[in-house]
Image: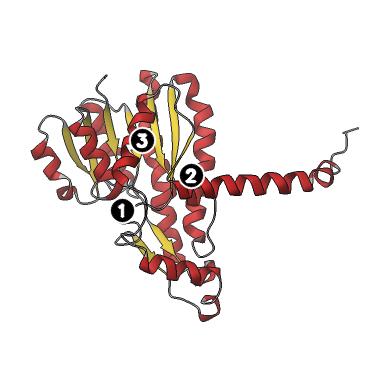
Amino acid sequence: MTQLRWFITGASTGFGRILAETLLDQGDQVVATARKPETVADLVERYPGAALALPLDVTDPAQVSAAVSAAVDSGGIDVLVNNAGHGLLGALEELTDEQIHEVLGVNLFGVLAVTRAVLPHMRARRSGHIVQMSSVGGVVANPGHAVYATSKFALEGASEALAGEVAPFGIRVTLVEPGPFRTDFLGRSLGWATPIQDYADGPAGALRDRFSTGHGQQPGDPALACQAIIGVVRDGSSPLRLPLGQAAVERIRDKLQRQLTELEAYADLAVSTDRPAN
């Protein structure tokens, strides 16, 4: 197999860490980035010459520019994996402005900043693959997870448009949409809003209860997910969207079927609003 060089954000834990280790074990090169580079420094020690550890807070424009420049200058970037991100549990009314801005800053604006920084390099080479770590929550919005869904829905829209924009340059885009996997998502990476009692007995409260006890019990194996991601990147006919896990497939299929049913039910009303211009 052709050796690839991967630039991974949020490589200290979860999908990012497992993906980095798997790739290095398979003989690829990895630029592992994290807000605290010491958390990925062991990869450099274990895989000398193949791993590079760089500091990167995706919300810091100077760090984004510096990390991408260092990666390009030291060997280039074949695959960008925008993995950095986290959840925020709470009904929309329960969230503070600061919490909302923080999640969107990392999950959306940070991803777009890194993507835009890498694109000139890939465009000049007329090749590359951008892997956006989205979520089943980027297709199906859970009550009680509104701002997380906002960040992932927006990422899905931007990436779908991006895929069409960069296809003429030989650059591919894949949105990865995991369901529940045994990562830190329900642990260290999850923020919690201060609850409002009125929401406790509704869907938002039910999600809070489920998430509070679900850490480590998720059915998805992140090692298998990373193997699937690697396989898709190496496949020249990779899809725009890659759901991962049975729960993701079932929830997305159900959402699309309900959406199509509703579209057909109101199609006559929808088209009745057209009137030819004079």
Q: Which type of secondary structure does the marked residue at label 2 adopt?
A: helix
Tell me, yes or no, whether the two marked residues, 1 and 2, touch with CB atoms within 8 Å: no
Tell me, yes or no, whether the two marked residues, 3 and 1, touch with CB atoms within 8 Å: no
Residue 67: percent from left, percent from top: 26, 38
The tag earlier along the polypeptide, 3 or 1, is 1
> Residue drawn 43% across and 50% down?
179
Rendered position, 177 above or below 192: above
> Residue drawn 9% across and 33% down?
48
Residue 128: percent from left, percent from top: 37, 25
- Mark 2 Cα within 10 Å, few/some/many (few <14, many 20+)? many
Q: Amino acid at mark 2?
A: Leu
Residue 7: percent from left, percent from top: 28, 35
Left/right placement of residue 65 relative to residue 164 reads: left
Q: Which residue is mark 3?
A: 229
3D distance between C-alphas at marks 2 and 3: 18 Å
Q: Amino acid at mark 1?
A: Thr
Q: Which residue is mark 1?
A: 183
Colouring scheme applied when the structure was drawn? secondary structure
The tag earlier along the polypeptide, 2 or 3, is 2
> Residue drawn 40% across and 18% down?
126
Does residue 126 show up? yes
Q: Which residue is mark 2?
A: 155
Number of numbered tags placed on the structure image: 3
The tag earlier along the polypeptide, 1 or 2, is 2
Rendered position, 20 above or below 183: above
Left/right placement of residue 239 relative to residue 51 reads: right
Q: Amino acid at mark 3?
A: Ile
3D distance between C-alphas at marks 3 and 1: 16 Å
